């Protein structure tokens, strides 16, 4: 089926099988490989994207539900090839180690800060509870999001 | 100076933007997708394999063991593990057949049309069953490997002791659970095979592929792609999946990609060895340990793989960082009909650390000695001798870490007052500590035999480029190596780059394991940089006819006079000589001696030390344990990059919290039942305790800028610290992890039956 959607600010039309997962459409049809598959059942959050303002696991979404949707992936964060402040503090704080959870983690952080500009540490923990990280112990990720909020 | 600074991670931009290319992000022209057909029984023989006649088999490529050009084994230590089963099945999920198709989906459909009929044999599924030898599945007695470490006279020591304390401790399987599952792409060519993918050790894969395909060194090219976590899980197993992809590629003569989904990854790949560890300790009334008899049993699974080395590390660490003149350690790794267990961060040490630290808690409780005092009475300090007879002569931060963790956490005051707060509450709080050590680098003569190699070359642009087979798996290899070289050459961090780990371009630096990357390979990288710097220095001295040339802030100078910039001098050198490059090899520091026959001597050139204080809350209605805070102090010699080092400590500590509280594999006849992220629980951000990390720097004179190993140490301490805190909170002495609500409830009920008054 034909689906028209907004991806990272650009309108795209694709022609794919209706039950194809959004994650596969992003990775295979649109060559946006930032979102990762860690479990395929909505537990790890590595495939997180923002759909119409909400963080969603793209491995659980069939493309047929995405007609007219507005989707933001990690690739849509850069500004003129430069890291945005949230990405920069992730880098400075050591919030990315192996990096496989990072695109999803950044997406969850971005969504939190869009709705809550001054989150507490507990609110940050809550916001990234659906994004598993096996490297960091989460401390540096929480530090980074806290610092991103402080610096605006 | 770059060392000691928190410079930005070399590959940070790519990781932050989604541009980093992990293996599953790569698609090649004409690529097929591979799938593995696995055994569904733990032990038996294949009778028949049936390919359903209603499926069009011309759509796929099938490979089995008969397609292997070389010998059917995955090269490792004993070479006993086949790449594909022939007739005998030794564990569930053993690979039998490979299928490649135009899509992942098609490969899966084809796999569903294969059925295997077996003649089943009785399986050995636990350590106890293996020891009974009702079936012999390995050697004469099902024992892969055994070690004896003996010192002094244990029997006499136990006789002299005022008290003999006996303890038995059980530790479970643990899944590495890197978030990127195992994956590999193989690309065949006329006379060569290239494999690229997620791995820690390109030269392990190189060795395995060479043998299986009868290729020579140059014909086998192994490239590490950006790797989404390893933790040991991508030490040995990538050889298997790489060779599977390569076999399909060889047969199809097209590139083949194989990516495991999570269920296959958890079910089929190696885990941390489960174990049973028994201590029988002789103690004097003042708390001194005078004898210790330790028996270690590890479940190796169905093939030997790395079990002998995991067991060796376990045995060597099993007495802990404690003095004792009379020691006998017996250690055995046994065979069972379960998937082979393998490398996981800590590599035998977390198992024995749980045991020796719980034994210290038990001794303290039975003798009525404060657990902190008991550690201080017995701890190894500089000049003391370990279980293998190693005298600790340098960089011994034992006392420093224990003091730091105790002081920073307020352990003594909290321990004194915490019980008052527990009256009449439905939750109880507790605080406990652990004290531990970890040897960095290969055990015993391993590093001396390996002679790890690395190189540094200078590019025509005047930048330094590091050539090493050590891999970046998130821990920061690329960054810290560049820091080390920048400072060794006196150039800026930005002027150092690192070559991709590709066996056709970088030398074998040994595997990226064993807390050896910084301390051992980092040292080799430093020596190679030194050699390159000296070459250039001699060149400049000759060129300008000056005797006393120095490199200061990227400029060759003499008597304060600038002769040439580093870049300009390098360009001239390269114009004249073609290239500017040097390689170095690792050699142990002087005086390091190890005897493999008696298992005595310097097991490691140096140890890192750690102390954890854990604060927990136990819900007395649900028996859930919450780790509230962990204060950890770790002596790692020198932090080349303090944020990365702290990241290793925090991440390793949380994996150990998972080991202690949540992570449990459920088995049914040799098969993992909970092979999904919905039911194998790793800590989320909400489960992660607050952490306070103190880095202690007792410089190691033979490490790069004083650095020791940090990778594994943090994995050792948190589980026993939490168990000690649970003991403090509830009175339940934990002998088995994970401390799940079910297990804690059962222990609590038996405690109530035993001591009704106490409750």
Image (cartoon, coloured by chain):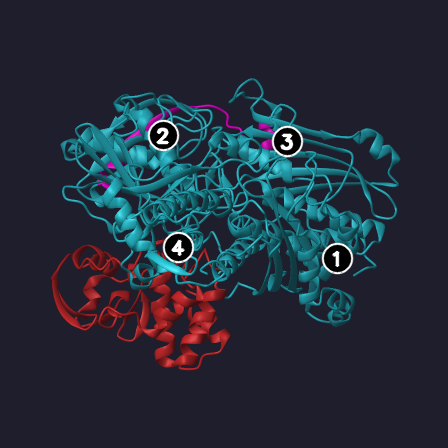
* Cβ atoms under marks 2 and 3 closer than 8 Å: no
Q: Label 1 to label 3, Cα distance in Å?
A: 31 Å
Residue indicated by mark 2: B207
Does residue B128 show up magenta in the picture?
yes
Cα distance, mark 2 to mark 3?
29 Å
10 Å neighbourhood of mark 2: few (<14), some, or many (≥20)? some
**Mark-to-mark CA distance, 1 and 4:** 40 Å
Can residue B94 be seen here? The reply is yes
Label 4 sits on a secondary structure element that is: loop
Q: Can see residue B52?
A: no
Chain letter, red in picture: A
Q: Position of residue A49 (x, y in %)?
A: 29, 66
* Image spot of residue A92 (x, y percent): 41, 67
Residue toward you, B527 or B649: B527
In the picture of the structure, the residue carrying the numbered disc 1 is: B731
| Quarter of the image with the C terminus of chain B in it | bottom right
């Amino acid at each position: 089926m034909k689906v028209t959607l907004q991806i990272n600010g650009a309108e795209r039309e694709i022609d794919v099988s209706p039950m194809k997962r959004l994650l596969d459409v992003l990775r295979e049809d649109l060559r946006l490989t930032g979102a990762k598959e860690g479990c395929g059942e909505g537990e790890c959050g590595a495939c997180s994207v923002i759909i119409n303002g909400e963080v969603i696991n793209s491995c659980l979404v069939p493309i047929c539900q995405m007609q007219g949707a507005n989707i933001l992936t990690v690739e849509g964060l850069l500004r003129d090839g430069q890291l945005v402040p949230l990405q920069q503090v992730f880098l400075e704080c050591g919030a990315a180690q192996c990096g496989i959870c990072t695109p999803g983690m950044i997406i969850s952080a971005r969504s939190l800060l869009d709705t809550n500009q001054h989150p507490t540490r507990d609110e940050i923990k809550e916001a990234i509870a659906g994004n598993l990280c096996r490297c960091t112990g989460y401390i540096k990720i929480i530090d980074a999001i806290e610092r991103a909020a402080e610096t605006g | 100076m770059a060392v000691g600074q928190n410079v930005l991670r070399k590959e940070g931009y790519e990781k932050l933007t989604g541009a980093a290319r992990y293996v599953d992000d790569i698609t090649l022209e004409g690529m097929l997708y591979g799938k593995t057909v696995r055994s569904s029984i733990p032990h038996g023989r294949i009778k028949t394999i049936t390919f359903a006649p209603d499926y069009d088999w011309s759509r796929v490529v099938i490979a089995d063991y008969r397609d292997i050009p070389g010998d059917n084994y995955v090269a490792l230590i004993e070479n006993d593990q086949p790449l594909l089963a022939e007739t005998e099945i030794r564990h569930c999920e053993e690979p039998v057949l490979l299928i490649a198709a135009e899509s992942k989906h098609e490969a899966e459909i084809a796999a569903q049309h294969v059925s295997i009929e077996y003649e089943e044999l009785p399986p050995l599924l636990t350590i106890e069953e293996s020891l009974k030898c009702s079936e012999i599945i390995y050697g004469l007695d099902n024992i892969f490997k055994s070690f004896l470490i003996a010192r002094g006279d244990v029997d006499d020591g136990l006789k002299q002791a005022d008290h003999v304390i006996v303890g038995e401790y059980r530790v479970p399987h643990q899944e590495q659970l890197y978030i990127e599952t195992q994956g590999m792409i193989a690309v065949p060519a006329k006379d060569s095979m290239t494999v690229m993918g997620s791995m820690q050790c390109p030269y392990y894969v190189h060795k395995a592929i060479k043998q299986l395909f009868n290729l020579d060194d140059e014909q086998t090219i192994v490239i590490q792609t950006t790797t989404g976590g390893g933790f040991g899980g991508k030490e040995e197993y990538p050889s298997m999946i790489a060779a599977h992809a390569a076999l399909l590629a060889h047969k199809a003569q097209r590139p083949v990609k194989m990516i495991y989904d999570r269920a296959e990854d958890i079910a089929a790949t190696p885990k941390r060895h489960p174990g049973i560890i028994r201590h029988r300790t002789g103690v004097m009334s003042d708390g001194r340990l005078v004898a210790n008899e330790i028996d270690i049993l590890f479940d190796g699974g169905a093939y030997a793989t790395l079990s002998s080395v995991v067991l060796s590390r376990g045995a060597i660490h099993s007495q802990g960082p404690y003095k004792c003149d009379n020691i006998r350690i017996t250690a055995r790794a046994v065979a069972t009909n379960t998937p082979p267990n393998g490398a996981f961060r800590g590599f035998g040490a977390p198992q024995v650390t749980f045991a020796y630290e719980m034994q210290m808690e038990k001794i303290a409780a039975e003798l009525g000695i404060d657990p902190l005092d008991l550690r201080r009475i017995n701890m190894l300090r500089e000049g003391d001798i370990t279980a293998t007879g190693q005298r600790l002569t340098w960089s011994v931060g034992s006392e420093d870490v224990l003091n730091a963790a105790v002081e920073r956490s307020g352990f003594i005051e909290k321990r004194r007052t915490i019980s008052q707060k527990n009256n009449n509450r439905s939750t109880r709080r507790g605080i406990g500590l652990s004290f531990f050590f970890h040897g960095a680098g290969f055990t015993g003569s391993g590093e001396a035999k390996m002679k790890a190699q690395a190189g540094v070359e200078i590019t025509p642009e005047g930048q330094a480029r590091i050539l090493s087979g050590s891999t970046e798996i998130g821990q920061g290899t690329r960054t810290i190596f560049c820091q080390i070289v920048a400072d060794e050459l006196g150039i800026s961090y930005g002027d150092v780059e690192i070559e991709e780990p590709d066996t056709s371009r970088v030398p074998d630096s040994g595997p990226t394991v064993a807390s050896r990357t910084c301390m051992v390979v980092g040292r080799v990288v430093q020596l190679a940089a030194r050699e390159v710097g000296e070459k250039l220095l001699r060149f400049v001295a000759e060129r300008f006819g000056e005797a006393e040339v120095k490199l200061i802030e990227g400029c060759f100078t003499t008597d304060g006079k600038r002769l040439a910039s580093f870049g300009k001098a390098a360009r001239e050198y390269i114009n004249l000589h073609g290239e500017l490059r040097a390689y170095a090899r690792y050699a142990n520091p002087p005086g390091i001696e190890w005897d493999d026959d008696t298992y005595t001597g310097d097991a490691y050139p140096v140890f890192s030390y750690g102390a954890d204080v854990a604060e927990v809350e136990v819900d007395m209605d649900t028996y859930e344990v919450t780790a509230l805070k962990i204060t950890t102090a770790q002596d790692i010699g020198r932090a080349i990059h303090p944020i990365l080092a702290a990241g290793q400590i925090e991440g390793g500590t949380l994996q150990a919290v998972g080991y202690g509280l949540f992570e449990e594999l459920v088995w049914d006849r040799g098969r993992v039942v909970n092979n999904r992220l919905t039911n194998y629980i790793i800590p989320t951000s909400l489960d992660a305790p607050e952490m306070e990390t103190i880095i202690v720097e007792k410089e190691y004179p033979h490490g790069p800028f004083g650095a020791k190993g940090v990778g594994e140490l943090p994995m050792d301490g948190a589980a026993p610290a939490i168990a000690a805190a649970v003991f403090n909170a509830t009175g339940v002495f934990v002998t088995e992890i994970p401390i799940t609500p079910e297990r804690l409830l059962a222990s609590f009920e038996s405690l109530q039956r035993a001591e009704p008054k106490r409750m």
